[in-house]
Image: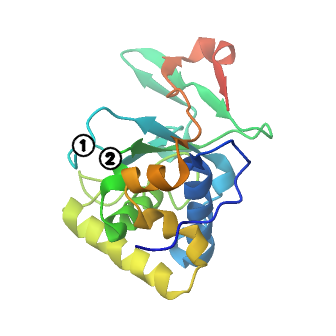
Amino acid sequence: MAQAPTSNAPAQSRGFDFTYHVSRLCADLCQRLEEMRHIDMGRVALRYCQVRRPGGYGLQASLTPLRFEEGRLRTTRGGRHWTIQRLYGAQGQEMLYLLSFYLPRFLNQAFEEKLATVVHELWHISPQFNGDVRRLPGRCYAHGHSEEHYHAQMRRLSRQWLALGPPPATYEFLQYDFAQLRGAFGPIYGTRINTPRLIPAETELARVERL
């Protein structure tokens, strides 16, 4: 088994701050991989979601865009104008994306799959970094003609990142499953955020979620 991951997260009596560590991992990925340098992690909110079923089936992680196509603030559906509830960071910056990890399911994958899953979700962020997702050609714009082919590319990108020699402290926590991490550190905790909702555009100023 690998050495226990080190932590410079804010002190807590005992426990492991998952969102702090995955945020640090994402920041390093975006710094080292040229394909992701358009991403400003200061405007990507991260959260963890507790799931009841720990098995391998179901969502591991997801990316929620907080703008509509081409970064628009509003859309029209059913003859009404809609917007997405705004989400702001601690420094007052508006967040453009919400990146979610589903525990314990995410942590119970193999190491390579966990790392590829993080890369997979970050890759969905538009190259314009405008709050919209990356749109590939064709009807299945999220993953292209094959989601498995898409994820295989993410595995290659994650191996490319490892070859660049990032500090082990940024990813060593992924070498543990949920039970092992909890056994080493105690409770696993992190940031929880309510999912921003689709709301009528005329009420947008009355519905603000702050981290």
Residue 160 position within the rendered picture, expressed as x and y whole percent measured from the top left = 44, 83
Quarter of the figure that contains the C terminus: top right
Judge whether 77 appears above or below 138 on screen. above
Question: Which mark is first along the chain, 2 or 1?
Answer: 1
Quarter of the figure that contains the N terminus: bottom left
Tell me if I can see residue 34 in this picture. yes
Taking depth in this image into account, of 73 and 25 the one nearest to the observer is 25
Q: Give the residue at x 58% y 33%.
A: 73
Task: Assign a secondary structure to mark 1.
Answer: loop
Using the rendered view, name the quadrant where residue 7 is placed.
bottom right
Q: Which residue is mark 1?
A: 58
Residue 137 disc label: none
Taking depth in this image into account, of 84 and 119 the one nearest to the observer is 119
| 7 with respect to 153 (left or right) | right
Q: Which residue is mark 2?
A: 105
Residue 168 position within the rendered picture, expressed as x and y whole percent measured from the top left = 56, 76
Q: CA distance from mark 1 to mark 2?
A: 8 Å
Q: Give the residue at x 55% y 44%.
A: 97
Amino acid type indicated by mark 2: Arg
